[in-house]
Image (cartoon, rainbow, N blue to C red):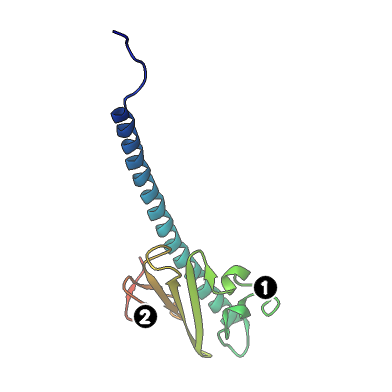
């Protein structure tokens, strides 16, 4: 009898199945990490915007909050308080909506651009500088603060 060298079809299929399982686990972990990173970046961007608004408020007389995010970048604001990408209202998977209510108050909402992919939670902030989150829909003043 001749001895054959090589692998059987069953052996190759088992190796492919194991590789597919490992790839699935790795890809889901990477996507989950990216999702979490986008949410943390959204919280950091909210903090940056709120701080920029507070600095703008104390830097102008009579004191007032900016009318829009574009007021926080040069040439309107000197120095610039936020980067030009954030001033467009979209950054790292989130859309930021700023609204000045009156000269003494504003609201800031952050929503994922693709719910479930770029983020799950929605964020809210106002002149109190407390960032609040809601996992089910747009966040508001009554939601829990981000820890």
Q: Nearer the viewer, residue 15 or 45?
A: 15
Residue placed under numbered mark 1 in the picture: 79
Please tell me whether mark 2 sits on a helix, a strand or a loop: loop
Residue 54 image offset from top left, x and y in percent:
53, 78
How many tags in the picture? 2
Residue found at x 30% / y 28%? 11
Front tag of 1 and 2: 2
Seen from this angle, which residue lies furthest top? 1
Residue 98 image offset from top left, x and y in percent:
51, 81
Does residue 83 appear in the picture of this structure? Answer: no
Q: Nearer the viewer, residue 77 or 5?
A: 5
Q: Nearer the viewer, residue 15 or 3?
A: 3
Residue found at x 63% / y 84%? 60
Quadrant containing the N terminus in the rendered view: top left
Residue found at x 34% / y 23%? 7
Residue placed under numbered mark 2 in the picture: 140
Could you tell me how far apart the alpha carbons at marks 1 and 2 are, in whole angstroms?
A: 30 Å
Residue found at x 37% / y 69%? 121
Residues marked 1 and 2 touching at CB (< 8 Å): no
Quadrant containing the C terminus in the rendered view: bottom left
Does 90 sit above or below residue 99? above
Residue 32 image offset from top left, x and y in percent:
38, 55
Q: Earlier in the sequence, mark 1 or mark 2?
A: 1
Does residue 147 appear in the picture of this structure? Answer: yes
Does 1 sit above or below residue 54? above
Residue 73 image offset from top left, x and y in percent:
64, 75
């Amino acid at each position: 009898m001749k001895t054959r060298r090589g692998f059987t079809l069953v052996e190759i299929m088992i190796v492919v199945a194991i590789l597919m399982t490992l790839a699935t686990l790795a890809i889901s972990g990477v996507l989950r990490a990216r999702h979490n990173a986008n949410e943390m970046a959204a919280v950091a961007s909210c903090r940056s915007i709120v701080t920029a608004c507070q600095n703008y408020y104390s830097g102008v007389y009579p004191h007032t909050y900016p009318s829009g995010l574009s007021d926080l970048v040069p040439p309107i604001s000197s120095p610039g308080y936020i980067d030009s990408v954030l001033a467009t209202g979209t950054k790292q998977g989130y859309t930021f909506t700023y609204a000045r209510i009156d000269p003494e108050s504003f609201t800031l909402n952050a929503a994922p651009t693709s719910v479930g992919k770029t983020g799950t939670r929605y964020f809210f902030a106002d002149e109190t500088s407390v960032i609040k989150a809601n996992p089910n829909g747009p966040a508001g003043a009554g939601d829990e603060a981000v820890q």
